[in-house]
Amino acid sequence: MINLREVTETNNMIARENLDVRTITMGISLLDCIDSDLDKLNKNIYEKIYNSASDLVKTGDEIAREFGIPVVNKRVSVTPIALIGGSACKTKEDFASIAMTLDKVAKEIGVNFIGGYSALVSKHMTKADKLLIDSIPMALAKTERVCSSVNVGSTKTGINMDAVKLLGEIVKEAAEYTKENDSLGCAKLVVLCNAPDDNPFMAGAFLGVTEGDKVINVGVSGPGVVKTALEKVRGENFEVLCETIKKTAFKVTRVGQLVAKEASKMLDVPFGIVDLSLAPTPAIGDSVADILCEMGLEYAGAPGTTAALALLNDQVKKGGVMASSYVGGLSGAFIPVSEDQGMIDAVCANALTLEKLEAMTCVCSVGLDMIAIPGKTKATTISGIIADEMAIGMVNQKTTAVRIIPVIGKDVGDTVEFGGLLGHAPVMAVNEFSCDAFINRGGRIPAPIHSFKN
């Protein structure tokens, strides 16, 4: 039984500590939409998504009203479009037409993002994969709500360096396509290693081919709740610190489990997973960096930051995994720069660099996320940054990602405003020494020795 104290505690988390359900994401398989005729394919995609998710936003709002729990975003993820469009699409403009169909139906049903304009190329690229990747800058420039992702590596297959080289060029091209809007297109493009099939968070969400026809995945978030809990044990030893994080993560995840099961029942769609990530927002008091400071760091990026983040990530998972029947997605602590005011403050104080952020990604969820860099940065340098992050994921058997934004016309010291959940970001310095010869080798970096487990 839930007692009155626990009810009051949860209410306080929602009212004062920014506890929310960050997203209800409906995954929709488009495999049965495939057709060699492009017009028919687009019609099939529109009808499948509309018929499946037309009640998603209304359901999320009803749950929020009934339980008093904010449900911030309602989203859709679909089967990677490179697989769906391969038969019908002969040019990158053909693929871009599918992106516009996705954008149209997303607006019709009212979701804020739709993910799955994606390709899975960790070993090699098909013609369709290459065409879709080539179309990404155009697709993101012509749409508002479409998110794109490309998986270029895995622990089992290694890193497709041809794709890594190409993605460096695509990121630059996407920045140019949207330069009038501070290169915002790049904020909707993420490059992944070990991409999960059930991630509810954007921009990396897509529905894996092992999933069913439809599924409900929920992402919860409560950095403010964790920080408030740690304020009460300030100065205590690590055992107390860890226990406090675990207990708090359990409570946060129970909220997500409740919402996920209710959404599943109301929509008559199977429940998939709860992603128990700590995902910050630009709101004051909703910051992962502030948790690290509460642990005893002057700023995120100070010596001890990687250890503190490793502790946080592990305890969140230990506490959350007992609170849900199915935990999946990414699950851990996100460290996006533009979406976390504490991270922004650390960059502005010169406490946090790109290299330190890379070290932190070894022990947390995802990777180099929402980082603005000078628009003059070379494509090969961006490819080198992607390759480094993919290597961390491949060797450590974890998901890593790069969502980096070379802001055309901006340099170190400038600030970029993205607005909404995407926040704002100081432009960070990038190591300008060349990696051209390395990136231009081509081919594939082999899987690590510990991948051979059959």
Image (cartoon, grey):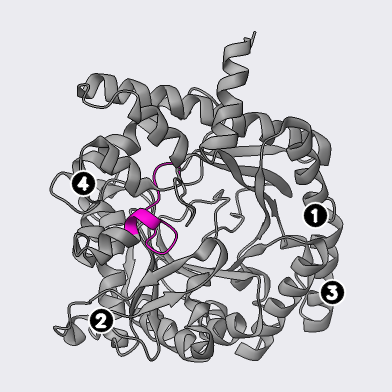
Image depth: mark 2 or mark 3 in front: 2
Disc 3 to disc 1, C-alpha distance:
16 Å
Magenta stretch, main secondary structure, is loop
Residue marked by disc 2: 381
Measure the C-alpha gap from mark 2 to mark 3: 40 Å
The residue range painted magenta reads: 331-343
Callouts 2 and 3 close, C-beta under 8 Å:
no
- Quarter of the image where one finds residue 230: top left
Mark 3 vs mark 1: give the one in front: 1
Tell whether position 373 is magenta. no
Assign a secondary structure to mark 2: helix
Q: What's the amino acid at mark 4?
A: Thr
Sequence order check, earlier mark of 2 and 1: 1
Residue drawn at (62%, 9%), measured in percent from left and top?
3
Q: Kindly report the distance in space between the C-alpha atoms of the residues bearing marks 2 and 1.
A: 40 Å
Q: In x, y percent, where is residue 157? A: 35, 59
- The type of residue carrying mark 1 is Ala
Residues at marks 4 and 1, CA–CA distance in whole angstroms = 40 Å
User: Which quadrant does the N terminus fall into?
Assistant: top right
The residue tagged 4 is 306
Judging by the rendered image, the residue that carries numbered circle 1 is: 53
Report whether 136 appears left or right of 309. Answer: right
Q: Secondary structure at mark 3?
A: helix
Which residue occupies 74% across, 50% down?
213
Q: Amino acid at mark 3?
A: Lys
Q: Secondary structure at mark 1?
A: helix
> Is residue 325 visible in the rendered structure shown here?
no
| Residue type pointed to by label 2 | Thr
Q: Dot 1: within a 10 Å radius of its alpha carbon, few (fewer than 14), some, or many (20 or more) residues?
A: many
- Please indicate whether residue 148 sits to the left or right of residue 261 in the image: left
Give the total of numbered labels.
4
Q: Is residue 44 above or below residue 297?
A: below
